Structures are given as structure tokens and as C-alpha cells.
Image (tube, rainbow, N blue to C red):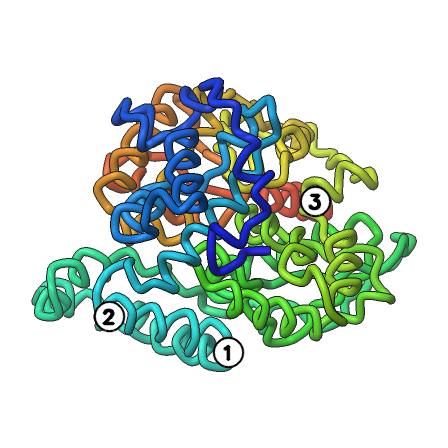
Amino acid sequence: MAKASLRDLDYSVLQQCMHCGMCLPTCPTYIHSKLERHSPRGRIALMRAVADGRFDAGEELAREMNYCLGCLACTTACPAGVDYGTMFETARAETEANQTSGGAMRRFYRWLVLEQIFLFPERLRIVGWMLRFYQRSGLAGWVRRLKLPYLLGRKIGDLEPQAPPMEARFSDEQIAEVETPPPGIPVRGRVGLLSGCIQSLAFGSVNRATADVLLANGWEVVTPRLQSCCGSLHAHNGAPELARRAATALMDRFGLESLEAVITNAGGCGSHLKHYAGLFQEGDLAARARAWDAKVKDIHEFLVATGFRKPANPEAEPLQLTYHESCHLSHGQKIRNPPREILRSIPGLQLVELPESDLCCGSAGIYNILQPEESQRLLDRKTGRIAETAAGLVATANPGCHLQLARGLQQRALPVQVVQPVVLLAEAYRRERLSP
């Protein structure tokens, strides 16, 4: 459970690090700077000093925690099983509680986004409608040509083009609340589908593809309306109380007892969704959170574990693709092979392994907003690796990574399309139905 202070954290968590250095070659910020303070063990030493009362949880701690991507690559490399994620979220919560992360304007935007928009799905939907009109009406083009966003400051001007493109139809418009497999496919059980917050607005088609794949494999799909944010945005940005509010609201949307699993298709959200028990370690919601954690499954993990039908389309044209691993799918959920297994099952696709496939692309939630220069450096490195593969497609399983990679490939003018594995599988099933 993310507490307000490092001093309140179970001290054994802070003592886990052996300072062996196995994490150093995996940490994106250390790889670049070669400075100990930008490494996981350096940050742990800083957090332990705060817990021991030898160092204040002031601006220096805030700067270092904000510079950390929270990608959790260090947890995969660590031989001692250090729980870096808990320490990281606790440190961020403490710096936010002490108001040492930025000035009044940052705190205003943080309040607006975390408390007034992402906790209320109806408000987020209104923002989505407004943004969709702005992007699709041609207004965005005029605003950019006149450089009007820069009247609000350079940072706003630089950020405006990075707003995620809204789809023509949001998730709830594409998926019925309850859908059953088509005739001829035996029903294996019932699952819930998490539609997400930004995912439901900008990637409703990915949710539609996820539902189609589940239906094609015999699963009845329940997708509750107007689902709230899962709370990962709040937990990773030092707001544990808001994360608990979001988690409670989301669990209330699902009748867990009637579902064999709750399916997520976003790597970053999934890592948080599987750890609600950490938010509710005591009280009435503790048992409910543990039951929730046990049922949340990533779509790739679920399909491989339950056995998915491999599509048959022998006449498909060969096409090379590569795969970028979402940090929180790979390092947070430890799911690495299932997406590859799905990609390899699709006729015509030839998977070319991406060098440094599990190195962060620089998206990392809102890292590309908070640390634009470091984010861009990581994005340049990632798109350079993609170019080396000569693939025409790059697959990834997280909306943040999808948007970040698409932006970087556009910057380089590389003719590479970003897709998600579940979308490719859904398209393969669709081609099956259309083939004579």
C-alpha cells in the first residue's frame, strides 16, 4: 500500500537492495547519464536516507523521482526481488504531500486532471467529445498554423500536437454491454472487458478487436458502460487516496462473481489492475480487492493460458513485423512470450526480434510531458532500433507506447505502421470469414 511517508513504509522493503549493480545496465536513465543517483540503487539509497531521517524529502528527492521512468526494468534484473515499485510510489506520494514537486500552476493542472476529470468518466467523455471536434473539424490545423497554443506558454504549445487522436466512435458506441459468441461457436464462459479511460476514447477499435477475439474463442463478453479510470495514473503520480477512489468505482462496475476473468488489453493499466490488494490491505474492501486481483488477466496471457484458436489463412501475403514490449506488461506483469506467440500464429506475419525490445520508449504514463527531453532521447533510440529491423509493422500492447511510437516514426518519416497484437489477430479471424 502506497503510504504518505517513506518512514511509514515497512523497513524490510528498503533493506532488500544488495547494491549488486545488476540493475544498472537495464535502467534507461543510468544508461544515458552513468550517474549513480540516476540508477535504481542510487534512488533506493536516497529513499532509505529519507526513511532514516538523514535526508529531507524535499526538492532533490522530488526531482529524482520525477526523473525516474518507473519502467520497472530493474525489478526484472534484480536477483533479490527488490520491490522497487512500492518504494517508488511511496516516494512520489511523499513529495506530492510535501508539495515539493513544482509550483502552483503544476499543482492546479494536477488537481484538474487527477481529481476533476479522470475520476469522473462522464467528464472525461465530454473532454473526449470536445477534443474529437477540435481534431476532426479542421480547427486544430488553423490553431497550429497560427501558433495559438504558444500564447499559453512554450510548454503548452509543444504539448498540444501530442494530444491523442480521438476515434470517430468511442468504445461504448462500438461494443454492446453483453455480447455472445456467434452461432456455431460453443460458449466456454463469461468474461468482463475493461475498456479503460483514454483507451475507450482513443483506442475504442482496439477494445472492439479484443471483444471480437474473445467471442471468436467462445467467451461471452460483458463490457460495463462508462467505466472509470483504473487509478494507475493516480498511483504512479503520488496520489494513493485518489487511486483507491478510482479502484473502488471500477470494481463497483463489475459483477465479479459471474465472471471467470476480467480482461485488460493495456499493459500499463494491467500492471496496476492486478495489484488492488496493495491499495486495500485492511478493511471491508481488502477481500474484494484480492478476489479482483486474482481475476484480472491480460488479453495475451488469457488467450495463451486458455488456448486460443490459431487463424487459418494460408494465402496471406508475407509481411515482416517487430514487437516493442510495454514496460509494465514485460516488467510489471512479467508477460513476455504470449504476445509473441499470438503474433507468430497469424498467417503471413514474420516476426523479427527488435533489439532492446524491452527498453522503455519514453512514454511512461505522462513522462513525455514531465521530462520531454529525456523522453525524446529514448524515443529516438527506440525508433532507430525499429528502423534497423526493416519491418513494415511494429506491434505493441499499450496505448501510451502506441502513441509514442507513432509520433517518433512520423518524426523520422519512417513508413512503419504501429499496431496491437490483438488487432492483428482479430483481422486474421475476419479474413477467415471473408475467404471463400
Q: To which residue does mark 3 refer?
A: 429
In-front residue for pair 4/118: 4
* Residue 232 place in picture, x, y as percent: 52, 57
- Residue 200 x/y as whole percent: 53, 65
Residue at (47%, 77%) from the top-left corner?
125
Task: Identify the residue position indicated by label 2 in the image.
Answer: 138
Q: Is residue 160 left or right of residue 434?
A: left
Residue at the spot 11% in from the left edge and 65% down from the top edge: 153
Amino acid type shown at disc 3 = Tyr
Mark in the foreground, 1 or 2: 1
| Spatial separation of the CA atoms under disc 3 and disc 1 | 35 Å
How far apart are the two marked residues, 1 and 2, measured between alpha carbons? Answer: 28 Å
**Which of pointers 3 and 1 lies earlier in the amino acid sequence?**
1
Q: Residue at x 56, y 50 (%)?
A: 266
Please give the name of the residue rendered at 81% of the width and 64% of the height, measured from the top-left corner: 180
**Numbered badge on residue 181:** none
**Label 1 SS:** loop
Total labels: the figure holds: 3
Q: Closer to the observer: label 3 or label 1?
A: 1
Q: Which image quadrant is residue 379 in?
A: top left
Quarter of the figure that contains the C terminus = top right
Q: Is residue 39 above or below residue 90?
A: above
Q: Dot 1 corresponds to which residue?
A: 120
Left/right of residue 377 with respect to residue 74 in the rendered view: left
